[in-house]
């Protein structure tokens, strides 16, 4: 970098960027022939390490259009990085623009008139730009030199990842530019695979420089609570348990839920985050903690942040967390998991286990800035098993899952590899409609060439695409002109012209909730007038529901509303389940477990030894009731469930099959244990079409645009893309050694 710019940049960046750690990365960014994937811990200065060289190159040779695009997964992250980059670029006289739904049209018009500098944008807003500003693309991006993808792990899975790669390829074709791609992530599980994806969509090789680890020590604790009161743990375990990392700064009400009271007592006077795994739980936890403040006659010190809240509520929480003079706690979902800088955060809590190692690391990474060590307190909650509860109900699944996630990273530095769909037919529909809408008209051959040449669709056959086009013609999604070309049809226009078309992730039909003139957020399936709802961390009574305009009017009341804490297993990898099994088998302690967790784990291990559930996957629960513990991840578990129903149930006399994904399957069975394993082995050894694991007449709509696909493609995408049949078969083969 030029000396003057280097000094200014380092002064502005503060202590975010550690130059010695990035000495191998910087030359890669200067190399004109390759993409770069920068993998390093959260808050290590990845953004600055990417942009310092880019800005240096721009000061020496300013692009004649937008020179770099920064793609981020969240609007909040875009806004946060906009402030950081604006400060950085001001001294180099390089403009920074941001573009998403909350940005003013005047700001966007200035960019269209004077394309230059750096553009920060979400994938959805880039889709909208390519769709509606098609004629501007060459002018806007004709001299585009870099595309920086932040939090690349979150944009390298599922349809949203596929959409991002498609957008990059479409942008390159329309603009005539060939930018280099720089990916940034703290938690890419398989860097080589991610690098190949970047190479496929850009035509350049990807280098992955080795970044020196910082050697930061974690402050980590994990405690267990029964929701309905004292666990009655024995004193003998206290000596091997971790003491509390910090003293309590408050006292919860006497009737408090033990786990919630624990959080309440250790957050006063501190700046903390409390992570939960669902929006319903986020509302319930916030309402509970605020009620404790009322009962203690204390001012409210809890905020809330999740995707269904209005932008005003979310931005208020972000602003308070950034304010160094305020010490409040925000209850949140994954919306604050990604790299928004919320300042000197002292502590993160996690209620129950997250679903992935990646999520655990991202949430832990919210802390550990401004000179503080990363600190997370796990709070594992469980209904106390009844005295005569069946075996599966006596296993503390979330405690085992939390331990497994921590151990997989600390022992192996393992993080889940990204999982892209093999047959992304929902995305295929979306990109077909987007491509056709942006170009106006295309022949079937030209449309197929434009879409199927995108690297994301390399597995899609010409026959499958012909089937899709014929179906879209029959449903008026597209129409044929008199000259034989294809255009968007009347039904298709209703989709393409809806602002929700820009996103490929699934959305529920939502109602906007208002109280007088204030917008609170959105909910799904509102209750009738007179019922209560929980939103924005408060309880409201529904006064009126306008179904036509999708509006709910309500007033603030006191009280609490039961939230739905339904099981939502998420996408859990098989390796996590296998490590959970190992936690039950091994006779070792973990230094982050506190006394209740140590005692509960001891109980679980004793139960596992007595029942044999870690040695024998099939356990008789009494009479003809059985339970299978396959120790498989979500997609292999789903394949096993269907395999039992469709391939084995008749021969084994299986009925009343009841899965608790992805932990166990209970069922009634007339056959015995040996016959069970013999039948599974024989059926798994046979060659069968994955489509045979789709129920008769079933059209499993998993993705957002599956409803617009022919049924045959929906079934094929589910059977070949969702079900992990290879993982299921591998597990069945491993059971062959089980003796009678």
Image: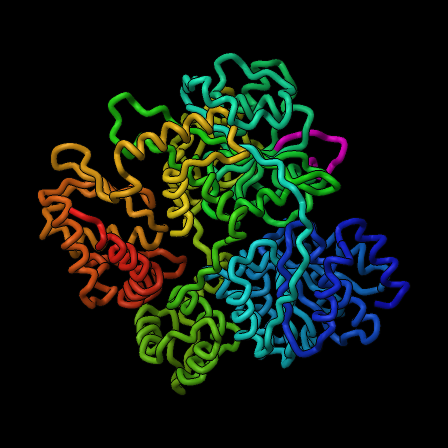
In the image, is residue 699 part of the stretch drawn in magenta?
Answer: no
Q: In which quarter of the image is residue 187?
A: bottom right
Q: Is residue 484 above or below residue 562?
A: below
Q: Magenta: predominant secondary structure element?
A: loop
Q: Nearer the viewer, residue 562 or 737?
A: 737
Looking at the image, which residue is at 42% across and 18% down? 234
Q: In this view, does 388 lie to the left or right of 597?
A: left
Q: Where residue 540 sits in the image (x, y, percent)?
A: 49, 27
Q: Where residue 614 sits in the image (x, y, percent)?
A: 31, 41
Q: Where residue 171 sits in the image (x, y, percent)?
A: 59, 74
Q: Is residue 161 visible?
A: yes
Looking at the image, which residue is at 38% across and 33% down? 396
In the image, is residue 322 part of the stretch drawn in magenta?
Answer: yes
Q: Nearer the viewer, residue 733 or 46?
A: 733
Q: What stretch is highlighted in magenta?
A: 320-329
Q: In this view, does 505 lie above or below 268?
A: below
Looking at the image, which residue is at 25% across and 64% down? 690
Q: Is residue 136 visible?
A: no
Looking at the image, which residue is at 14% across and 55% down? 679
Q: In this view, does 45 lie above or below 3?
A: above
Taking the view exactly as shown, the residue that stands out farthest to the top is: 254
Taking the view exactly as shown, the residue that stands out farthest to the right is: 4
Taking the view exactly as shown, the residue that stands out farthest to the bottom is: 483
The quadrant of the image that shows the N terminus is: bottom right
């Amino acid at each position: 970098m030029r000396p003057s710019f280097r000094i200014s940049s380092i002064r502005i960046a503060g202590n975010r960027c550690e130059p010695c750690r990035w000495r191998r990365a910087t030359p890669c960014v200067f190399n004109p022939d390759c993409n770069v994937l920068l993998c390093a811990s959260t808050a290590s200065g990845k953004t600055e390490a990417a942009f310092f060289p880019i800005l240096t190159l721009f000061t020496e040779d300013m692009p004649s259009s937008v020179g770099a695009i920064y793609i981020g997964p969240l609007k909040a992250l875009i806004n946060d990085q906009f402030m950081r980059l604006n400060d950085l670029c001001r001294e180099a006289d390089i403009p920074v623009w941001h573009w998403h739904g909350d940005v003013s049209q005047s700001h966007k018009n200035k960019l269209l008139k004077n394309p230059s500098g750096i553009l920060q944008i979400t994938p959805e807003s880039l889709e909208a730009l390519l769709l509606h500003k098609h004629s501007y693309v060459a002018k806007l991006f004709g001299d585009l030199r870099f595309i920086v993808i932040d939090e690349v792990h979150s944009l390298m899975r599922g349809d949203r990842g596929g959409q991002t790669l498609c957008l990059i390829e479409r942008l390159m074709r329309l603009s005539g530019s060939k930018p280099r791609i720089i990916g940034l992530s703290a938690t890419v599980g398989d860097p080589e695979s991610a690098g190949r994806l970047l190479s496929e969509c850009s035509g350049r090789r990807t280098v992955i420089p080795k970044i020196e680890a910082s050697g930061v020590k974690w402050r980590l604790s994990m405690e267990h609570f029964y929701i309905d009161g004292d666990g009655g743990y024995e004193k003998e375990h206290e000596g091997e348990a971790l003491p509390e990392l910090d003293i309590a700064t408050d006292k919860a009400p006497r009737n408090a839920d033990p786990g919630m009271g624990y959080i309440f007592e250790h957050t006063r006077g501190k700046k903390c985050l409390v992570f939960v795994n669902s929006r319903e739980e986020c509302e319930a936890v916030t309402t509970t903690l605020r009620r404790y403040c009322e009962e203690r006659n204390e001012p409210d010190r809890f905020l809330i942040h999740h995707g269904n809240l209005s932008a005003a509520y979310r931005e208020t929480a972000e602003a308070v967390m950034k304010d160094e003079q305020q010490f409040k706690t925000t209850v949140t979902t994954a919306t604050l998991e990604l790299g928004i800088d919320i300042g000197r955060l002292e502590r993160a809590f996690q209620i129950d286990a997250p679903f992935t190692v990646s999520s655990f690391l991202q949430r832990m990474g919210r802390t550990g800035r401004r000179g503080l060590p990363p600190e997370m307190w796990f709070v594992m909650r469980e209904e106390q098993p009844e005295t005569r509860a069946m075996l599966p109900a006596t296993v503390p699944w979330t405690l085992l899952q939390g331990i497994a996630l921590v151990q997989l990273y600390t022992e192996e530095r393992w993080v889940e590899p990204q999982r892209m769909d093999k047959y992304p037919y929902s995305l295929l529909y979306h990109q077909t409609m987007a491509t056709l809408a942006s170009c106006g008209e295309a022949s079937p051959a030209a449309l197929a060439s434009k879409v199927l040449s995108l690297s994301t669709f390399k597995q899609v056959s010409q026959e499958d695409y012909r089937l899709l086009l014929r179906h879209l013609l029959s449903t008026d999604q597209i129409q044929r002109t008199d000259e034989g070309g294809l255009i968007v049809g009347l039904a298709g226009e209703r989709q393409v012209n809806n602002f929700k078309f820009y996103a490929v992730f699934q959305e529920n039909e939502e109602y906007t909730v208002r109280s007088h003139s204030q917008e609170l957020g959105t909910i799904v399936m509102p209750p009738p007038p007179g019922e209560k709802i929980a939103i924005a961390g408060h309880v409201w009574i529904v006064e009126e529901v306008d179904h036509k305009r999708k509006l709910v009017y309500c007033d603030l009341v006191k009280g609490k509303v039961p939230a739905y804490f339904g099981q939502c297993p998420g996408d859990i990898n098989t390796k996590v389940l296998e490590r959970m099994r190992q936690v039950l088998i091994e006779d070792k302690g973990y230094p982050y477990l506190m006394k209740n967790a140590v005692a509960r784990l001891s109980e679980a291990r004793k139960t596992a030894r007595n029942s044999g559930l870690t040695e024998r996957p099939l356990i008789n629960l009494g009479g003809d009731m059985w339970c299978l513990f396959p120790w498989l991840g979500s997609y292999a578990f789903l394949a096993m469930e269907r395999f039992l129903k469709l391939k084995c149930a008749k021969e084994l006399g299986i009925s009343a099959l009841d899965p608790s994904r992805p932990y166990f399957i209970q069922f009634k069975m007339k056959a015995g244990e040996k016959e069970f394993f013999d039948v599974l082995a024989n059926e798994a050894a046979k060659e069968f079409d994955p489509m045979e694991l789709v129920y008769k007449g079933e059209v499993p709509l998993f993705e957002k645009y599956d409803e617009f696909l022919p049924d045959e493609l929906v079934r094929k995408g589910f059977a070949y893309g969702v079900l992990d049949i290879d993982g299921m078969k591998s597990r069945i083969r491993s059971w062959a050694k089980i003796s009678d």
